[in-house]
Amino acid sequence: MSVMATTGDIILEGVDLKKHFGSGGLLSSPTVVRAVDGVSLDIRRGETFAIVGESGCGKSTLGRLLLRLIEPTAGDVRYEGRSILKLSKGELRRLRRELQIIFQDPYASLNPRMNVGDIIAEPIWLHNLASGSAKRDRVADLMRTVGLLPTHADRYPHEFSGGQRQRIGIARALAGDPKLIVGDEPVSALDVSIQAQIINLLEDLKDRFGLTLVIVAHDLAVIRHMSDRVAVMYLGEIMELSETDALFDNPLHPYTQALLAAIPIPSPSSRQPKALLQGDVPSPAAPPSGCRFHTRCPHARPVCKEQHPALEAAPDGRRVACHFWREIQGAGAGSISAPPPSAALAKRLALYQTWRERQDKPVATSS
Amino acid sequence: MVHEAARRPITEIHHPSNAALDSERPLLSVQGLSIRFDGAPKDVNVVDDVSFSVRKGKTLCIVGESGCGKSVTSLALMGLLPTPPARIVAGSATFDGQNLLTLTERERADLRGDRMAMIFQEPMTSLNPAFTIGDQIAEGIVRHRKVSKAEAMERALDMLKKVRIPAPEKRLRAYPHEMSGGMRQRVMIAMALANDPELLIADEPTTALDVTIQAQILTLIKRLQEETGTAMILITHDLGVVAEVADEVAVMYAGHVVESGPVEAIFEDPQHPYTIGLMGSVPSLGRRQGRLATIRGTVPPAELMPKGCRFTPRCPFSDARCGNELPPLGEIRPGHLARCWYAPVEQKRGAAA
């Protein structure tokens, strides 16, 4: 996976991005929610980049900022080295073809009054890519690509299951031949077995069309499986940015350590008491001073309350925003170790996979 | 219990090494529970021949995906299933010697919130936005105990302390919207445990919560369970949660229990193809090992449900027999049951090329 991602080739870049939402004013004093507060990141061509964090950390807002679906309060977004904030309407429309998004709730993001064929065809006629029978062929082709039956093109979204609706959303995102797709929690509304189908589909499509994926998610197991690099967000800021395996093997930031420690491990034999993070995420309308994590951080010291830590460089191209990451790293907390499956499970899984492949052969696209 | 066991296989777990535990009757024993929805095709029950049991102080996890009947089962036990459209067509649920399913509505209401309590997934929609937290906890106490309002409020305050809510005196007078999701779920737990129930049913109690808050709530539930000896049925779709808290597990698929047994057996020696597929579908937390195993397709709609094993159309190992004849919940090892003709698969399906 990571072979394709060469360090120098940046496809999308966020520079000191800020998004502040204002509210109140008439009867109450205005409060400003700093949803994204000074985030810089580069996304390399061909990689899968994950943005992870808990609710309210600003990860979805960041995903939308990167596509200019919302306008940033400050900062810049550069696609292929060019700022996308000053584009004209026509240029922006062309850009929309290349940058696409898949939403979390596949039902809410599909027009219930359009049939699936029209939903998928819409980007094709919007961008004048094809018309008439060529368009119909293209739609049928896309439906086959994502594992839907082309004969279902005249059905409506409510006639499909959640997983199939997500496939429709993916087909629509693919319709304009995108270069980069942002997936905003693309699998979190789905059942486990369906989730696995969609994850595999996204990976296949990425390989086949040479896509760059940006996955916004909260499920760390999904992220470990799918992504090459991860940015961990907390209250509108990046706490740590690292290659995926390095992050999971040796988390540097205490928040990353706490996040990893909180994941339930699917192995009853490795139950152990956990060091738990106390309290809730503070309101992004009134973030704590200094390091935003200091109110919940087990390693916090007085300086954390006063000084805001910069996202500084750590070895292996990693970056971490913590005053004391060097010392904390030595504390040995956090690295996650899931025991391998038992011999019986491994054997049956292998057998399951063998029979599963055979099951797929007669009909290429099942669900 | 002995004659019951002879009638049909039950998920009762025997510990040959522990005679004292073995002689203890389960607190709740569900036998052959079948529930039908009006309007569903003939012979397709939304919950079909479901059996399981829970002991005092133990946790049973019912795991399955949407539509498998896990929530319907729990609502039926609590007597919260609306009839019509739902009808219990067969089975019994013995709670401490009495069959829950034959009680009058009045008797059920006396039980509910007192000896049996329930926690729901969405704490915001289960709390009344117009009443304070204290009022809502006290309401259940006044309903079941001969106490004054003031005493009930005192008890409510104790409960808030017990679930480790910071500044409990202040929270007693707070409204649900003033609290975070994790805090609201703590309030739900305080409410459910206010009358020291013997059985707690938790339906996806942490699904709506962030992972750090989920860890807090699971730890809290476990600790309270140790303190009070409450038996728990935890309904979830998250195998990680199951591995963390369960003593016993029942895996449900499309209304059937397809596999059940002690938690170690389910994770280390899973038998049913659905259980195996489910485990292969979950990304590992270790280093990446190739593609995920998937389960083909989706759960069929009721009118296309096969007569036999309901997993047939999605199962890689299935053949014509599976679709026509329902396999029994066969015993793999004492206490570990699987509803599959071909379990264990490496013996019955391993050689075929």
Image (cartoon, coloured by chain):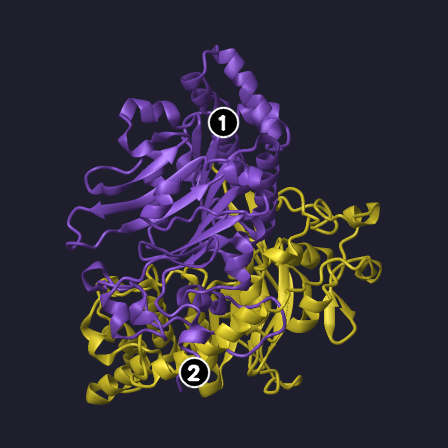
Chain colours: A yellow, B purple
Residue A188 as seen in the image, left or right of residue A311: left
Residues indicated by labels 2 and 1 sit on the same polypeptide chain: yes
Q: Amino acid at mark 1?
A: Ile
Residue B90 seen in the figure = yes
Above or below, B267 relative to A283: below
Between residues B206 and A358, which one lies in front from this camera angle? A358
Above or below, B141 relative to A320: above
**How far, Cα to Cα, is label 2 from label 1?**
61 Å
Q: Which mark is residue A339?
A: none
Chain ID at mark 2: B
Between residues B123 and B247, which one lies in front from this camera angle? B247
Secondary element type, mark 1: helix
* Rendered image quadrant of residue A269: bottom right
* Rendered image quadrant of residue B330: bottom left
Q: Which residue is mark 2?
A: B351
Residue A341 placed where, x, y %? 58, 68
**Is the C-beta separation of discs 2 and 1 under 8 Å?**
no
Q: Which residue is mark 1?
A: B133
Secondary element type, mark 2: loop
Residue A289 as seen in the image, left or right of residue B24: right
Residue A122 placed where, x, y %? 28, 75
Looking at the image, which residue is at 47% across and 68% down?
A: B281
Q: In what quadrant of the picture does the C terminus of chain A appear?
A: bottom left
